[in-house]
Image (cartoon, rainbow, N blue to C red):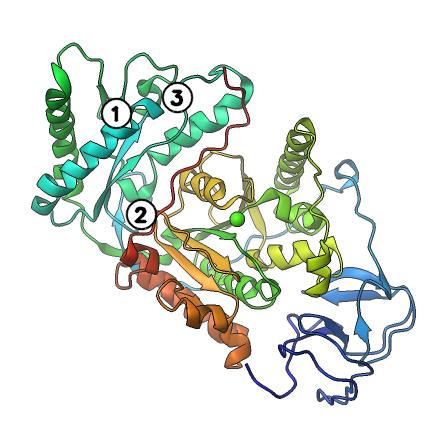
Amino acid sequence: MTLHPEIIQISTEDNIGIIVNPLGLADGTDIGEGIVLKERIPMGHKVALKKIIPNDPIIRYGHTISYAEKIIEKGEWVNENNTSLPPSPPLESLATNVSNSREKVSLTDYTFEGFKNEDGSVGTKNILAISTSVQCVAGFTEHVVKKIKEELLPKYENVDDVVGLSHSYGCGVAINAPAAIIPIRTIQNIARNPNFGNECMVLGLGCEKLRPERIASSSNDDVFYMQDNAYQGFGEMMDGAMKIAEKHLSKINARKRETCPASALVVGMQCGGSDAFSGITANPVAGYAADLIVKAGGSVMFSEVTEVRDAIELLVNRAANSDVAKALIHEMQWYDDYLEQGHADRSANTTPGNKKGGLSNIVEKALGSVVKSGTTTIVGVVPPGEKLTEKGLNFAATPAGDFVCGTLQLAAGMNMHLFMTGRGTPYGLSSVPVIKISSNTTLSNRWHDLIDFDAGRMISERKSLEELGWELFHLILDVASGKKTVASDKLKLYNDLVLFNPGPLT
Ligand code: CA
């Protein structure tokens, strides 16, 4: 941390800056550009960079976060006491007759070394995935994966890993309830993640409600039942599963890394354990890199419905057309209804801690989260458990919970995951590389072997957004190529798949 006065202005249109110095800045501090602080302002809080008259917008991230309620002089503290919250229009009244042009693909020279699939998708890892139809077989699957790793994997040098896709679903559920389609299609689509090379094998029990055939989609896919009469005891079952695995391993082993355009990237992004700097450093840097990926023709998805809900008007305005705008509103409405059924308070209202950290209201909080989506047009909306189909920036509708969001983004077909954190989390996924990005250098130093990229250098080393955005973009290409290994892969720190099941249990 630097000791001289440090202010961050995210967008050139912003009429406020954020105080970065850990102890805040004292009354009378000269912060340059002819601005002298009129009072003490704490870290993470806003200072007026120009005189703002009543009813003028307070602009942060290039957007209106509130309106001035009184004259705010240059150098004054801008907070909830001298501003008012803009009205949040109900979903029904949002205008959907929008039209925004798609980003032109202007960065054509960037490539990575990936595993091409027949369907045009590209893997960043070469993994044998073992799908499962029901939790009953989780222990068996674990045995099979262990045995494959010990006995078969050394013979197939092009295969990076074997991953068992165990989950809590499959039986004891109302399989025909309308909402059941979400966990079912999630399981189906995860089996088709680009990192698994379209080689599908499914371990099932035999009597479960989720029929293993629903996960396997083609005749090339293999389905194994523990209850198959052919197997006399556990040993024979293991042999049977190993035989199927070997068939798929030999096919996957034929895959080799080839040069692929950056347009084959499908990057999922989310936050977890955020702090006051997440919206100042980590999310804007991720947003800059997101723009670069989209300009390279690739796909990016951001998610977490409850964390974007209060910035929905901005997202709708960025939609490519009215269909995308309506789809965005539909997902918000669906989630509003879902939360209401559970008698949950929908609003992620600012907590006293948020306000203390400088987030004056819910619009400002949501903007700090949405900034990770960058600036490009939203070309598609991916309902929970569905696959992403439109190249460019997509909104994948998921809960904000880290594991549920990651699981749904896996189903959407991500081959790279960006995870922004301020407090720190050991989050990792075995199927897709997770680049963990810290919002502050203190965390990055303390967790030197758990964090992959320090966006806090925007403050601690005065690096520019542009510089760090490009650096992250290059890191994404290197990780996608297998040239760099992320911390969670080095340490094999992996979280479980957690399905989003809004349907009833029986
Ligand atoms: Ca999250």
User: What separation in Å lies between label 2 and label 1 (alpha carbons)?
Assistant: 25 Å
- Can see residue 109? no
Mark identifier at residue 122: 2
What amino acid does circle 3 point to? Gly
Q: Nearer the viewer, residue 326 or 43?
A: 43
Q: Which mark is residue 445?
A: none
How many numbered marks, from 0 up? 3
Q: Secondary structure at mark 2?
A: strand
Q: Which quarter of the figure has residue 81?
A: bottom right
Q: Earlier in the sequence, mark 2 or mark 1?
A: 2
Return the residue at label 1. 203
Residue type indicated by callout 2: Val
Q: Residue at x 38, y 45 (%)?
A: 495
Three-letter residue code for mark 1: Leu
Give the mark nearest the N terminus, 2 or 3.
2
Split into 4 quadrants, where in the image is the N terminus? bottom right
Residue at numbered disc 3: 170
Residue at image x 40%, y 46%? 414
